[in-house]
Amino acid sequence: MMDAVAAGARLLGLAEVQWRSPVWNEGAVRCYDRLGAHAEEKLRCTLSVPG
């Protein structure tokens, strides 16, 4: 599947593909590591909007 995603990205002229995975999903993180993906720590902020 990731080969198809990469091929589609190449056709679109993209240099990279990004996606998100929860930190707790260790199996997915290991899989992405094996694929050669580079994980970056990101800060996600949430602002509650009063009713």
Image (tube, grey):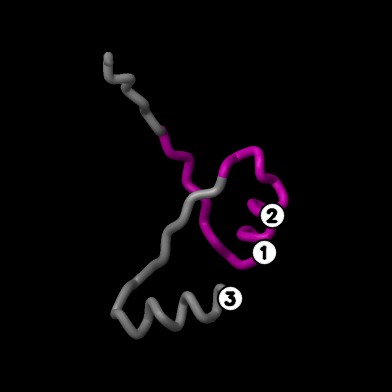
In three-dimensional space, the C-alpha distance between marks 2 and 3, rounded to whole angstroms, equals: 16 Å
Of 33 and 2, the residue lying toward us? 2
Q: Disc 3 vs disc 1: which is toward the camera?
A: 3
Going 63% across and 58% down the picture, which residue do you hit? 33
Q: Which residue type carries mark 3? A: Met
Which comes sooner in the sequence, label 2 or label 3? 3
How crowded pointer 1 is (Cα within 10 Å; few <14, some 14-19, many 20+) is rated as: few
How crowded pointer 3 is (Cα within 10 Å; few <14, some 14-19, many 20+) is rated as: few
- Quarter of the image for residue 30 reads bottom right
Going 40% across and 33% down the picture, which residue do you hit? 44
Q: Quadrant of the N terminus?
A: bottom right
In the image: residue 12, left or right of residue 42:
left
Query: Answer yes or no: do the residues labelled 2 and 3 have beta carbons within 8 Å?
Result: no
In three-dimensional space, the C-alpha distance between marks 2 and 1, rounded to whole angstroms, equals: 6 Å
- In this view, the residue farthest toward the front is 51
Q: Position of residue 49 (x, y in %)?
A: 28, 19
Q: Which residue type carries mark 1? A: Arg
In the image: residue 37, left or right of residue 28:
left
User: Does residue 31 belong to the magenta stretch?
Assistant: yes
Identify the residue position indicated by label 1 in the image.
34
Q: Position of residue 42 (x, y in %)?
A: 43, 39
In the image: residue 8, left or right of residue 4:
left
Compared with 5, 11 (above or below) is below
Q: Which residues are magenta?
A: 22-43
Callout 3: helix, strand or loop? loop
Identify the residue position indicated by label 3 in the image.
1
Q: Which mark is residue 30?
A: 2
Going 72% across and 51% down the picture, which residue do you hit? 27
